[in-house]
Image: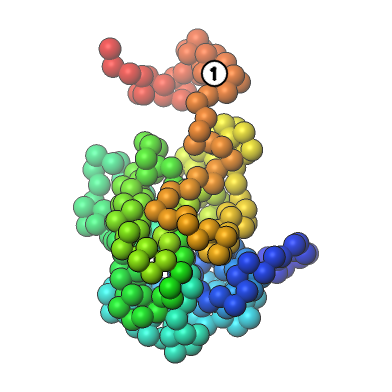
Amino acid sequence: MESAYIMPDKAHYGLLKGKKGIIFGPLDESSIGWQIALHAYNEGAEIAISNVATALRFGNIDALSKACGNAPLIVCDASRDEDVNKAFLELKEQIGSVDFIVHSIGMSQNIRKQMPYEELNYEWFMRTLDVSGISLHRIVSSALKNDALNDGASVLALSYIASQRNYWTYSDMGDAKSLLESIVRSYGPRLAKRGIRINTISQSPTYTKAGSGIPGFEQMHEYSDLMSPLGNASAEECAEYSVTLLSDLTRKVTMQNLFHDGGYSSMGATIPMIRLAHEVLHDNDLAERVSLDDYKPSR
C-alpha cells in the first residue's frame, strides 16, 4: 500500500523553486494545509510548518516534516500575540524571511458541542473568531513587524462559501470566514506597496478532521458534489491550485476570494435536483422525515 505521506508520481513544474514559506495549521494527511505543504515542497519550495503544541505532539506532523525535506516544526498558537511573534523570530533563524504564508487554521467549540446558533456560547464564539479569523491579521502583522515577509510575497488563507451564504450547521464558522475575507480586503492595499498579494480560496466541502465534525457534513458534501458541474474539489486539487497563487504566475491577483469548488458557487439548480425537490414536496412522509416544514418560508 502506498504511504499516505508520499505524493504519487505526477508532473511538477518548479513553480516555487527558490522560494521559502511557512504553512500554519497542517494537522493530518486529510487536511488541506498538509496537502499544500507537500505540493509546495514538491514544486521546489523550502518550507516550515507550524501548529499548536498539542497538534505537534499527538499528530503525525513529524511525518509531514520528513516528507518535506525535514522542514522545521514551529510551535505556535496563532491566537496568542507572543506565540506568533516568537514563531517568526524562530522562522527567520531556521530558514530566513519568506516568500509565502499559508493560513489553514480554523475551529469552533460551538460546532463541536452542536450549540444552536441562537444559543451560542459567546466565550466560544469569540474564540472561533480569534482562532479562525483574527489569527490571520495577527500572523501578517507579526510577519511585517519582524521583517519576515519578502517583497512580492503571497499570503493565502482558506475560506468557505458560508462566509457569503447561509449554511445552517456551519454556524459561527460562517461569521469567522466572513471576518477572514474582510481582513484580506483590508490588508490588500497596505501590502500592495511592496508587491505582496493576499487572497482566500473558497474550497468545496472537504473531508478533513475539522470539516467532518460539522453536523450534516456528509449530506453537505454529497449535495455540493451533485450540484457542482465538475464535482467537489479534493484537498489535493486545492493544494495544486494554491501553488499557483503562491507562485509568480499570479503577481497581480490580490484581495480576491477565489472559488475552487467545481463550479458550485455559480450554480442555481440542476434539473435532477429540481425534480427531486418536487417529489419531496408531494411526498408527505418523506417531507416529514427531512423536517421540511421547519424550513418552509412564512406566508
Disc 1 is placed on an element classified as: helix
Residue 204, how many percent across, how many down? Answer: 53, 45
Give the total of numbered labels: 1
Q: Is residue 42 visible?
A: yes
Type of amino acid at the residue the image marks with label 1 = Ile
Q: Nearer the viewer, residue 127 or 242?
A: 242
Question: Is residue 102 placed above or below 213 in the rendered structure?
Answer: below
Residue 8, how many percent across, how many down? Answer: 75, 63
Q: Residue at x 53, y 24 (%)?
A: 269
Residue 295, how many percent across, how many down? Answer: 36, 24
Q: Residue at x 53, y 77 (%)?
A: 20
Residue 94, how many percent across, how many down? Answer: 48, 87
Q: Nearer the viewer, residue 44 or 252?
A: 252
Furthest-top residue in this view:
282
Q: Quadrant of the N terminus?
A: bottom right
Q: Is residue 9 left or right of residue 257?
A: right
Q: Is residue 63 left or right of residue 165?
A: right
Corner quadrant of residue 231:
top right
The image's colour scheme reads rainbow
Q: Residue at x 48, y 13 (%)?
A: 281
Q: Nearer the viewer, residue 76 or 164?
A: 164
Q: Residue at x 47, y 55 (%)?
A: 253
Q: Is residue 38 visible?
A: no
Q: Nearer the viewer, residue 283 or 168?
A: 168
Q: Quadrant of the C terminus?
A: top left
Residue occupied by mark 1: 274
Q: Is residue 12 left or right of residue 143?
A: right
Question: Is residue 164 placed above or below 97 in the rendered structure?
Answer: above
Q: Residues within 10 Å of mark 1 (few under 14, many from 20)?
A: few
Furthest-bottom residue in this view:
93
Corner quadrant of residue 274:
top right
